């Protein structure tokens, strides 16, 4: 199994002088290709800091982070942005869709911003439509987010996360703004992605959602407190 995420003694310290907060205090984790992993932890545990670093939104103070074998822990902001766009698909609790832009155009955004892409406008549209078809929303391609239900908006967000064929899908509370029925539908979609070989790292505060993954990592005080398999999933 290829390794998608590997960290060595990952640390993140905020503050200066005598006032320092160790958000991460030496985190070592490894996530293989095709794994579906949940990250949990109380407020202040460091899980948001960890996800920001793993998502190439921030850099560690110390330690190493390898994404699909590449050391990204010391890259600058421009380099991190390129890695995010090329290798990571994000799914957010609040969807983060452009409000006056069609579902198709929202899904196309990562393709538009992809550096060095040789795709034509037609090819980008075709690829975005294929991503919408994969989440069952091809018939809503021309609709703006305010014309879609919460579940449909999250499906658009999933399609946007998939459109660049990322090595890692990061989901931040993907069911947090949804009712139980719609949340279950989104989780089924996540299971479908996983069954096709997708590597998924998901933050959640709901134990029943975490238990649907293969493995749960629990952070406490900036350290990995639990890293275990979830039943027979």
Image (cartoon, rainbow, N blue to C red):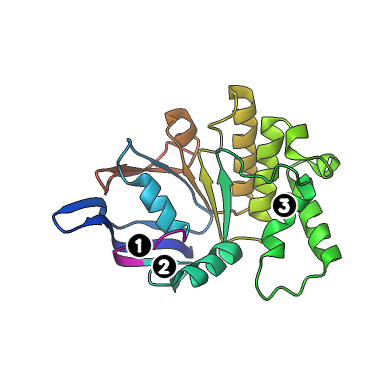
User: Which type of secondary structure does the marked residue at label 2 adopt?
Assistant: strand
Residue drawn 82% across the image and 70% down it = 120
- The magenta span reads 56-64
Residue 7's disc is 1
Residue 154 vs residue 109, the one in the foreground: 109
In this rendering, the answer to whether 138 lies above or below 56 is above
Considering only order in the chain, which callout, 3 or 1, is on the residue closer to the N terminus?
A: 1
- 2 and 1 marks in contact (CB < 8 Å): yes
Figure quadrant of residue 226: top left
The answer to which image quadrant residue 29 occupies is: bottom left
Above or below: residue 184 compared with residue 10: above
- For disc 3, the neighbor class at 10 Å (few under 14, some 14 to 19, many from 20) is many
Q: Is residue 57 magenta?
A: yes
Residue 170 location, x and y as percent?
52, 50
Residue 28 at x, y = what percent? 30, 58
Magenta part, dominant SS: loop
């Amino acid at each position: 199994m290829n390794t998608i995420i590997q960290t060595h003694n990952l640390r993140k310290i905020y503050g200066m002088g005598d006032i320092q907060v160790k958000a991460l205090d030496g985190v070592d984790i490894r996530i293989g290709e095709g794994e579906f992993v949940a990250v949990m932890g109380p407020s202040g545990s460091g899980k948001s800091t960890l996800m920001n670093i793993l998502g190439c939104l921030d850099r560690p103070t110390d330690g190493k982070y390898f994404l699909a074998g590449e050391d990204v822990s010391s890259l600058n902001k421009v380099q991190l942005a390129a890695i995010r766009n090329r290798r990571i698909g994000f799914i957010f609790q609040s969807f983060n869709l452009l409000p006056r832009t069609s579902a198709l155009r929202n899904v196309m955004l990562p393709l538009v911003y992809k550096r060095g892409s040789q795709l034509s406008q037609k090819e980008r549209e075709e690829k975005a439509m294929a991503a919408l078809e994969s989440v069952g929303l091809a018939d809503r391609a021309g609709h703006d987010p305010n014309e879609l239900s919460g579940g449909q908006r999250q499906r658009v967000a999933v399609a946007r996360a998939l459109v660049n064929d990322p090595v890692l899908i990061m989901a931040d509370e993907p069911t947090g703004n949804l009712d139980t029925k719609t949340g279950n539908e989104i989780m089924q979609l996540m299971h479908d992605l996983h069954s096709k070989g997708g590597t998924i790292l998901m933050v959640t505060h709901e134990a029943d959602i975490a238990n649907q993954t293969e493995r749960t990592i629990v952070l406490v005080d900036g350290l990995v407190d639990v890293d275990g398999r979830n039943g027979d999933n």
